[in-house]
Image (spheres, rainbow, N blue to C red):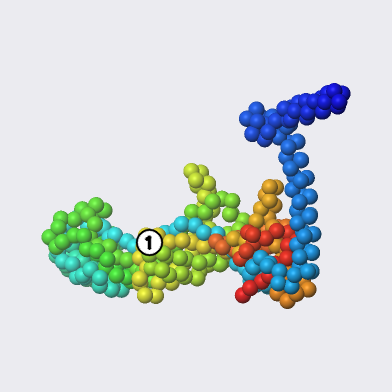
Amino acid sequence: MKKLLIIVSLFSLTVACESEKKPSVSELIDSGNLKGLRAEKDAKTKTFNSLKIELNRINAAIASLDPNENLPLITAISLSSEKFNHFIEFQASIKTRKNVLLYPEFNGILKKIYVREGQKVKKGMLLAHIDDAGLRSQLEQLEIQTALSKTKLERIQRLWDQKIGAEINMLEAKTMYESKLKSIAQLKKQIEKTEIRAPFSGIIDEITANAGTNLMPGQTPVIRIVNLDEMYTEANVPERYLKSIKIGTEAIIEIPMLGREYRSTIRQTGSFINPNNRSFRVEAPLVNSDNLTKPNLTSKLKILDYSNQEAILIPLRIIKENAKSESYVYRLKSDQKEGVYLTEQVFLKLGKKTQDRVEVLEGLNAGDLIVDEGASIVENNQRVKTIE
């Protein structure tokens, strides 16, 4: 009896010692025992996999024995190919090359303004007039003198044709007449500078000077004229898109403030890379038929960089990732019962994406049925039931 008690005591002591030697998970974490944690992970993983296999066997048995099995409810998506256009988006600004603030070329008093703000004008129309300080009077006198020089030259020319008079007299008269003509031309150019005319057809956006203002050439602004018919949007694009964007590439111009989108194409790409931000300039025209779009409005320029006529697209929200960052979804395989399917984990190769969808390059085909709502509660090789 004493020997039996000794053996039992030794066994209890051995078990106690072994339990004391095996630390808990918390103790392993606190002590930073990496080897012990890995061993504990392997043991629990084996236990988990074993339980999962048993659970699948139990579910299969229940399915065969219970016709009213309570299966997880899901919705499904039937995949089909479709056209997919992918756009890259950039912040842009609306501009026009016909937006000019007119400055005087002549120093003088602004005598009269012939237009009003908001008025439509045509190219070459007289907008304002500067006091010419007597230039027109000088022109009239010079034209009279020129007419006299011409008459004198004609008389001397007739005498010279009759071989009467000296050649020097004819040359002097001819020189005097030509000099007067040049003076008239120069004076007319000076007078033209006293007239401010529209350089192109457009709208008078702003009149910045008043009649009576003393104008300084190139310094005193007078009138701003704008043409809103020929607008364009401009954006700075990172140099990595240099090969993707070419003249003629399809583009969409979005103006958030107006809630509008315009179809366009890239008509110009910059030949210079900005060293400060490593970008180049692109430009797309904009048809502004109602003149609602204004210069300097903030816009978004979306440029087509990829297109696939038969793409497979799935919602981003149903894509899962494992510990290796591999993307997967659950495909459905038909079961014996109507509306009941078996899940299959399918790993994917993904391509371009939009805000809510992504293109599947490998893993799925048109006609496949995949889990939509309920994807977070199902597992691989699980029986599920679809609902509308």
Q: Quadrant of the N terminus?
A: top right
Which residue lies at the image location 22% right of the left edge and 54% below the top edge?
Answer: 220
Q: Can residue 205 be seen here?
A: yes
Q: Quadrant of the C terminus?
A: bottom right
Numbered disc total? 1
Q: Nearer the viewer, residue 137 or 242?
A: 242
- Whether residue 30 is situated above or below residue 354 in the rendered picture: above
Residue furthest to the front in view is 1
Residue 104 position in % (x across, y down): 24, 58
Q: Determine which residue is flagged by label 1.
A: 297
Residue 291 position in % (x across, y down): 35, 72
Residue 106 position in % (x across, y down): 22, 57
Which residue lies at the image location 74% right of the left edge and 30% below the top edge?
Answer: 19
- Whether residue 105 is situated above or below residue 288 in the rendered picture: above
Residue 312 position in % (x across, y down): 67, 67
Q: Nearer the viewer, residue 41 or 107?
A: 41
- The picture quadrant where one finds residue 378 is bottom right
Q: Can residue 179 be seen here?
A: no
Indicate the amino acid at tag 1: Leu
Q: Nearer the viewer, residue 330 or 296?
A: 330
Which residue lies at the image location 76% right of the left edge and 67% below the top edge?
Answer: 63
Which residue lies at the image location 71% right of the left edge and 72% below the top edge?
Answer: 68
Q: Is residue 266 left or right of residue 8?
A: left
Identify the element where label 1 is drawn.
loop
- Whether residue 125 is situated above or below residue 32 in the rendered picture: below
- The picture quadrant where one finds residue 196 is bottom left
Q: Residues within 10 Å of mark 1 (few under 14, many from 20)?
A: some
Q: Is residue 305 left or right of residue 222?
A: right
